[in-house]
Image (spheres, rainbow, N blue to C red):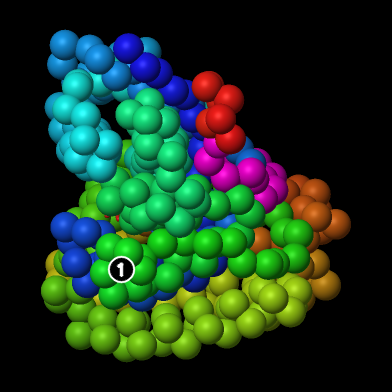
Amino acid sequence: MSSATACAQPNIALVKYWGKRDEKLILPATGSLSMTLDSFTTTTSVHVGEDADSFTLNGSPASLAATQRTTGFLELVRELAGDDRPAAVVSTNEAPTGAGLASSASGFAALALAASAAYGLDLDQPALSRLARRGSGSACRSIVPGFAVWHAGTDDASSYAEPVPAPDLRLVIVTIDGHQKAVSSRDAMRLTRDTSPFYDGWVSSTREVLDEMVIACRAGDVARIGELTELHALRMHAVIASSRPPVRYLAPASVSVLDTAEALRASGVQAWATADAGPNVCLLTTPGDADEVAAAVGGLGGVRVVAPGPGARLVSPELG
Ligand code: 2P0
């Protein structure tokens, strides 16, 4: 029996991924850029050599759907390793699953690293990122510490995330609703691609915003990074809302956080809003302004200040 344990954290995209060109390989329509967090850790152990695959999440057997998705991912690892023994996967997750804090990103990043080590594979960072992507697209970015750019690529080999230099920033996460979302990202992405009349414009404009964002990150231009972050999040919610039937993820309280960001900027505090496929809003800010931003949104939801994190890492065996 061989075992390995890995940790990973979610990431928040400043340039969003929304839409696939290949659903089987999880190749995105465009590249994206994110910050891997230092909080909401997923810790996953993989024990190879069991009688059958199993998946325990936060101390209980996981749902059938989650177990099937995990087993499907293990199949990829077994194929790479040339080892068909079943495995037990035991995972704990500090973020509320399905609440828009990208638990699938930390989950598949930790699983990719733990499973590849347990099955005896020694993958470098790009190869691990490619593997994590097959579990959940955004997971490829959680392999990488700090800021990551996910190259859309044209095939499995060319679609992975790698680090991008960026200034030190903070995200103030405002948790408005911790409940499971009504429409999954995966389903809503497909709906947007298939029904929005604005989807082509979303794809072409995202490519332009990503190019600008990479330049702004390399230049350490915080104001430009912030402006592009909020612009791109609002464009994503606009294209999602233009699907048929429409999907709305933002709640009235989310819009109040957007208003607060605008008011903070008017008073000279650096704060720009972004939101994923749910009502929670993150405010991008500097280390120096983070406390003031957190105080300003304290009445609107649960507040947590997070910093760039270390990326996925093996905690046992201590190989790297
Ligand atoms: C992102 N999101 O870039 C975007 C913004 C949500 C909003 O990536 O189908 O769980 O597993 O590849 O990665 C969430 O989608 O979707 C996501 P799959 P994933 O962070």
Q: Quadrant of residue 318?
A: top right
- Farthest residue, direction right: 288
Secondary structure beneath dot 1 equals: strand
> Ligand 1 appears in which quadrant?
bottom left
Q: Nearer the viewer, residue 112 or 168?
A: 112
**Quadrant where the C terminus is found in the figure:** top right
Does residue 287 appear to the left or right of 210 in the view shown?
right
Residue 239 appears at what percent x and percent y? 31, 76
Magenta-drawn stretch contains 172:
no
Q: Nearer the viewer, residue 182 or 313?
A: 313
Indicate yes or no: mark 1 CB to ligand 1 under 8 Å. yes
**Quadrant where the N terminus is found in the figure:** top left
Q: Quadrant of residue 147?
A: bottom right
Does residue 13 appear to the left or right of 192 in the view shown?
right
The residue indicated by pointer 1 is 28
- Amino acid type indicated by mark 1: Pro
Residue at the image position 61 percent from the left and 50 percent from the top: 145
* Residue 111 in view, yes or no: no
Instruction: Relative to 53, say whether 170 is above or below.
Output: below
Residue at the image position 70 percent from the left and 54 percent from the top: 170
The stretch in magenta equals 300-313
Total marks in image: 1
* Residue 119 in view, yes or no: yes
Does residue 155 appear to the left or right of 308 in the view shown?
left
Q: Nearer the viewer, residue 188 or 54?
A: 54
Residue 211 appears at what percent x and percent y? 53, 83
Residue at the image position 41 percent from the left and 62 percent from the top: 160
